[in-house]
Image (cartoon, helix red, strand yellow):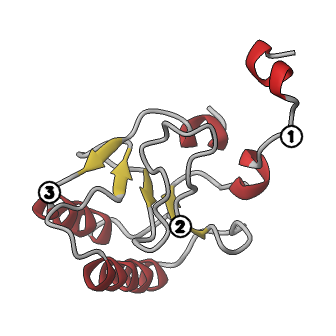
């Protein structure tokens, strides 16, 4: 399965803070072989070393804790609660339409995966603007 297929695949939203902390602990306990992709930058070509992974994850936790003052998490998603190998994390200050119901949903700020990423911004860039009729008739 390609990176983009996995990116667009099924994810589980982490709603409770306790579940979010448990996921981060699970990720910290398996720090090898992860690609750390900050989508505001170019996709990485190599996996992060264990220390870099843990440090980055701790930095993301600090941002989430200080800037997402909600009673629920709701900005962290994983493909598997028991053996995660793909995690999407949205920045609290750039949520947009996280639920994906928009034609052009927000792109997560951080993508953690065991698969080599591609530049997601380029891949998900909206197609050239269509006219009103062709947009609805899919011409």
Q: Nearer the viewer, residue 64 or 55?
A: 64
- Spatial CA span between label 1 and label 2: 25 Å
**Residue identified by numbered label 3:** 16
- Spatial CA span between label 3 and label 2: 20 Å
Residue beneath the point at 42% across and 55% down: 87
Give how far across and how far down residue 78 sits, in percent. 36, 49
Q: Nearer the viewer, residue 138 or 56?
A: 138
User: Which badge, 1 or 2, is on the more N-terminal residue?
Assistant: 2
Name the side, left or right, on which 122 lies relative to 104. right
Q: Secondary structure at mark 2?
A: loop
The reply to whether the C-beta atoms of the residues labelled 3 and 2 are less than 8 Å apart is no
- Spatial CA span between label 1 and label 3: 38 Å
Quadrant of the drawing holding the C terminus: top right
Q: Nearer the viewer, residue 138 or 90?
A: 138
Q: Judge depth for marks 1 and 3 and give the one in front.
A: 1
Give how far across and how far down residue 133 sits, in percent. 83, 19
Residue beneath the point at 39% across and 86% down: 59
Number of residues whose C-alpha sits closer than 10 Å to that of mark 1, classed few (under 14), some (14–19) or many (20 or more)? few
Residue beneath the point at 63% across and 44% down: 104
The reply to whether the C-beta atoms of the residues labelled 1 and 2 are less than 8 Å apart is no
Number of residues whose C-alpha sits closer than 10 Å to that of mark 3, classed few (under 14), some (14–19) or many (20 or more)? few
User: Which badge, 1 or 3, is on the more N-terminal residue?
Assistant: 3
**Residue identified by numbered label 1:** 129
Q: Judge depth for marks 1 and 2 and give the one in front.
A: 1
Q: Secondary structure at mark 1?
A: loop
Q: Is residue 85 above or below residue 56?
A: above
**Residue identified by numbered label 2:** 109
């Amino acid at each position: 399965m390609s990176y983009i297929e996995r990116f667009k695949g099924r994810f589980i939203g982490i709603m409770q803070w306790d579940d979010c902390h448990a996921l981060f602990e699970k990720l910290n306990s398996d720090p090898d072989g992860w690609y750390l992709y900050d989508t505001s930058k170019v996709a990485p070509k190599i996996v992060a070393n264990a220390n870099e992974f843990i440090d980055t994850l701790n930095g993301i936790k600090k941002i989430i804790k200080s800037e997402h003052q909600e009673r629920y998490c709701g900005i962290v998603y994983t493909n598997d609660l028991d053996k995660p190998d793909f995690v999407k994390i949205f920045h609290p200050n750039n949520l947009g339409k996280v639920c994906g119901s928009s034609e052009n949903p927000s792109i997560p700020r951080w993508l953690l995966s065991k698969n080599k990423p591609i530049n997601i911004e380029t891949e998900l860039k909206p197609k050239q603007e269509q006219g009103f009729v062709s947009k609805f008739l899919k011409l």
